[in-house]
Amino acid sequence: MTDVFRTIVNTVAVCAIPMMFVLFLGWGVVKKVKVYEVFVEGAKEGFTTAVRIIPYLVAMLVAIGIFRASGALDLLTRLLGPVTTLIGMPPETLAMAFMRPLSGSGSLGVMTELMKVHGPDSLIGVMASTMYGSSETTFYVLAVYFGSAGIRNTRHAVPVGLIADAAGMLAAVWVVNLLFH
Amino acid sequence: MLNYIWISLIILGILVAAGSDAADELGNTYRNGISLEVRFVVAKRPSPLRSAWEGTIVLSAAEFNSLYGPGSADSAVNQPAMVSVDASGRSTVTMTAGSGTPRLWAEMAKHAADPGRLAATAAPLNPEAEGNALPLRMVVEPIRFVRLKAVTAAALDYAAAAVNISIGLIGVMALWLGVMKVAGEAGLLGIITRALTPLTRRLFPDIPPDHPALASMIMNIAANMLGLNNAATPMGLKAMEELNRLNPRLGTATNAMVTFLAINTGGLVLIPATAIAVRAAAGSANPGIIIGTSIIGSGCATIAGVAASRLLQRLPRYRRQVEADHD
């Protein structure tokens, strides 16, 4: 079973992008599109989009950087740890739940650290990796996606993103406790 | 709301950093200005050619913790040190952080005047002393404002990182936007969009059923589900730009944009590639075991996000922001 999973995962990881190139560009050739000319035409938007998101990403990452460096996250984890233990969430994984929406590299670091200390197949290791897989870096997505469209007033996007994150984290805790505890 | 969250992250971060530095100062965590006695095991005595002692500061974890407080060292201390004597007879101890350095000194060394090298002033060692283990009285250089310095460094580092990330996106953006343009001209995206119309009509009722934004959104969600993050971001950004063409009020998010974002931050996934890779690297017996749990977790997150976006968009305070133009 393990090997089957691993084979599928590896195959998709290796083949998906080349297959997409073949399918998309090949379809263009079949439909007599001038593939090279059209590709270049589309590609030239890449620069302006990437540059347009810079101010949004600077604003967001600086705030997140300050918050992470201050140690406020440790403080929150220590304060809320006893509460979340009641719902079957080990305090160690709380740092993961807080870090996940803020920073992709930060939550990757937390996950790696937890696996090193507790082992990847321990309850904490499985829960941390499920939490990582159950959500995206909300604030990064918010800054980059809205930045590319020049959106400054995000309306209800932040509460929606945080509700999605909270639901993902709670579901991860619940399902891991159900299956692995 | 982003305004409040953004300023809270900054203010809370700075306040916690200042508070933590104040607590260090009050409790004198780093024993600034306090004379400590340690055991210096001599390796090389000063000679007429060099006036420095070389050796190692050797202490048990318990001895170190009795100097600095519990938890300062996790294992026995084996700190290489050099004691140099200047012309006026004063001694300076230089300790370079390494594997035998206790946790607290390693932390202090990071913030030392010469990063990585902790300095101390010491009472002169007696060259005539017998034996190899000599008592050394020293005052370690003062360490202050550790957190505030870290916060300042983080602000500058992350600003630079933001630009690096954006610039790094140019290549992969150009690649996928080019491929998508070819697929669009060839009519492939139209076929995909039409096939999924029953779904997209319900999720994005404000978007015309054949609009190109739908194709980009579908491609973005599909790439995310397969864990192809490199491909997902360019398609997502393209989708946002196309959604923005339908935006009557530039600079303000539309309902469709927030729903799309909810699907994205929910991160519906079939193959959580990064988590599996980290588990495999950590030596898991079964790295793929989290596939099922991640599908459930991200499924719940996505459903909750989409439901929340549909509910919250009806709230008067959010509705007013898009309707203001029509009044």
Image (tube, coloured by chain):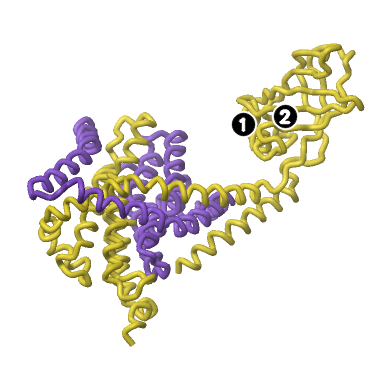
Q: Residue at x 67, y 40 (%)?
A: B111
The shade of chain A is purple
On the image, the x and y values in percent for residue A136 come to 36, 52
The answer to which quarter of the image holds residue A168 is bottom left
Among the chains, which one is yellow? B
On the image, the x and y values in percent for residue A113 come to 46, 38
Q: Which mark is residue B74?
A: 1
On the image, the x and y values in percent for residue B158 come to 52, 49
Left or right: where B158 falls relative to B176: right
Label 1 resides on the chain identified as B
Label 2 resides on the chain identified as B
* Count of numbered marks: 2
The answer to which quarter of the image holds residue A86 is bottom left
Where is the C terminus of chain B found, in terms of image quarters? bottom left
On the image, the x and y values in percent for residue A99 come to 46, 50
Residue type highlighted by circle 2: Glu
Taking depth in this image into account, of B44 and A86 the one nearest to the observer is B44
Q: Which mark is residue B151?
A: none
Q: Residue at x 48, y 57 (%)?
A: A60
Left or right: where B191 falls relative to B43: left
Taking depth in this image into account, of A72 and A57 the one nearest to the observer is A57
As helix, strand or loop, the secondary structure at mark 1 comes to: loop
Q: Which mark is residue B63?
A: 2
Q: Residue at x 20, y 71 (%)?
A: B205
Residue type highlighted by circle 1: Asp
